[in-house]
């Protein structure tokens, strides 16, 4: 009721309308929201109230884009250090806390209000509608939730969520021996849309193609992927195996930028979701810097996402008819999957670090099938409890058939091009 009540319905209705706004209407909306967010943050949020006055900016006399461009950039470390000083003194109602380890293993805790939850859900609902889902339709879900115990050795590795008419499948039990059971369960349930990690649905797609099989469900209209970078090769595999379009969604826990996929298969930067600046990088890429519109209780202004995109030419227009900017390529996180002794392949492992304090940076490495190592750059608060929590998280999500070594290090090696990988598998 909180996620999909009257407040949600009102927001969802407005967002369904804003997708058809003209470029000028979207720009006017962004400027109004920006001014409101920046002015209220400078007045009501201790973190910004302390940092903005020395800049000598006059919000009344300057154009708001000019003001915003002069504000300091912030990143994950700034938000972590700022903590609750980023909370607005004018916040109302309940706050919902959450944490993520992102791409580095270093935890980040944020708070959001119910209005932010409703608005985020409304945008996700709109993306699902672009993929063909309507209210009440069957959908399947294969992401990071613990659906069954990690130690379970036989199907079913899924459960039915009757309240949402959704089949929820474990992403921790995928293996060659279990793949047919997964595919059969999906065919039997016959969802209209599947929501999944690219690594999870991609595993099933690769297995089907290698076995000479194609998906046998009749109702599937689209597969919505998110949380991992979707390569062109993996997209083609999934679409070939399942016989439908893949709709990729880009977002982050910080909720400062979103990129969706329309019915024409084009990526769109959603300019009714947030205000995004693009900082030039190398090779025609741009770094995303976002100011979120969702969360007035803990606003993030000029937040560096750490991800890069390649935008289409400014004159590019999509046949879908929407005025959102077109994005040609998204370069986000690219991690390996861990292989377990029982044949399972598990991706997207940042869940192992969620809510764990005392870590500045972390990487998972696997050099043998029966063991993996966690390389931890510790903060001063790292202690025995941190170590025990990590061990418990690994057992909870991966089971007890793989050995674990927790290794404290001064730094994590980067790739040749200087990028960080959260998971490295050499098996």
Image: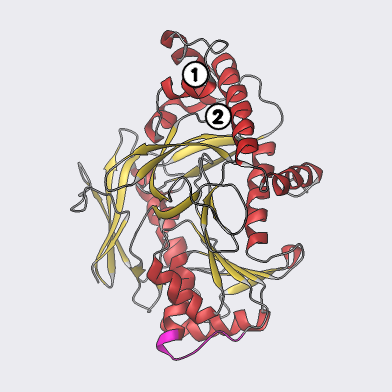
**Looking at the image, which residue is at 38% across and 55% down?**
391
**Looking at the image, which residue is at 63% across and 64% down?**
131
Q: Which residues are magenta?
A: 209-216
Q: Nearer the viewer, residue 225 or 188?
A: 225
Q: Position of residue 18 (x, y in %)?
A: 68, 44
Can residue 173 be seen by looking at this rendering?
no
Q: Position of residue 368 (x, y in %)?
A: 23, 70
Which disc number belongs to residue 273?
Answer: none
Tag 1 secondary structure: helix
Q: Position of residue 66 (x, y in %)?
A: 47, 21
Answer whether labels 1 and 2 touch (C-beta < 8 Å). yes
- Considering the whole magenta stretch, tell me its main secondary structure: loop
Examine the structure image and report whether residue 214 is included in the region drawn in magenta.
yes
Q: Position of residue 4 (x, y in %)?
A: 75, 50
For residue 199, above or below residue 379: below
Q: What residue did someone put label 2 on?
A: 299
CA–CA distance in space, label 1 to label 2: 10 Å
Examine the structure image and report whether residue 137 is included in the region drawn in magenta.
no
**Looking at the image, which residue is at 21% across and 51% down?**
417
Callout 2: few (<14), some (14-19), or many (20+) C-alpha neighbours within 10 Å? many
Q: What residue did someone put label 1 on?
A: 48
Q: Quadrant of residue 141?
A: bottom right
The C terminus lies in quadrant: bottom left
**Looking at the image, which residue is at 64% across and 76% down?**
220
Tag 2 secondary structure: loop
């Amino acid at each position: 009721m909180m996620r999909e009540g009257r407040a949600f319905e009102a927001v969802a209705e407005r967002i369904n309308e804003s997708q058809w706004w003209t470029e000028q209407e979207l720009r006017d909306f962004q400027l109004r929201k920006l001014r409101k967010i920046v002015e209220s943050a400078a007045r009501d949020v201790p973190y910004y109230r302390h940092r903005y006055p020395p800049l000598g900016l006059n919000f009344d006399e300057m154009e708001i884009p000019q003001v915003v461009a002069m504000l300091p950039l912030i990143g994950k470390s700034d938000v972590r250090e700022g903590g609750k000083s980023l909370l607005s003194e004018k916040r109302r109602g309940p706050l919902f806390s959450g944490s993520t380890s992102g791409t580095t293993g270093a935890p980040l805790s944020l708070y959001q209000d119910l209005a932010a939850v409703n608005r985020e859900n409304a945008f996700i609902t709109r993306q699902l509608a672009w993929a063909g889902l309507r209210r009440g339709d069957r959908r399947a879900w294969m992401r990071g939730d613990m659906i069954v115990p990690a130690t379970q050795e036989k199907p079913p590795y899924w459960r039915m969520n009757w309240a949402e008419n959704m089949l929820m499948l474990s992403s921790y039990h995928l293996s060659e021996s279990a793949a047919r059971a997964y595919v059969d369960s999906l065919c039997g349930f016959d969802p209209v849309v599947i929501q999944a990690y690219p690594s999870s649905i991609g595993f099933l797609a690769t297995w089907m193609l290698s076995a000479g099989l194609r998906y046998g469900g009749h109702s599937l209209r689209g597969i919505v992927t998110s949380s991992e970078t979707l390569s062109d090769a993996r997209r083609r595999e999934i679409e070939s195996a399942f016989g439908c379009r893949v709709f990729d969604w880009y977002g982050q826990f910080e909720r400062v930028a979103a990129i969706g996929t329309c019915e024409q298969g084009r990526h769109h930067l959603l300019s009714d979701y947030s205000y995004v600046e693009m900082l030039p990088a190398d090779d025609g890429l741009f770094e995303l810097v976002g100011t979120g519109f969702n969360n007035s209780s803990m606003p993030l202004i000029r937040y560096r996402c750490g991800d890069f995109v390649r935008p289409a030419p400014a004159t590019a227009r999509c046949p879908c008819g929407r005025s959102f900017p077109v994005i040609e390529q998204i370069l986000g996180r690219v991690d390996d999957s861990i292989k377990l002794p029982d044949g399972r392949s598990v991706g997207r492992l940042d869940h192992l670090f969620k809510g764990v304090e005392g870590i500045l940076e972390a990487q998972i490495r696997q050099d043998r099938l029966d063991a993996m190592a966690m390389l931890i750059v510790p903060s001063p608060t790292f202690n025995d409890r941190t170590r025990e929590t990590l061990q418990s998280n690994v057992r909870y999500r991966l089971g007890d058939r793989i050995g674990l070594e927790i290794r404290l290090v001064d730094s994590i090696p980067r790739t040749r091009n200087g990028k960080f990988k959260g998971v490295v598998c050499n098996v």
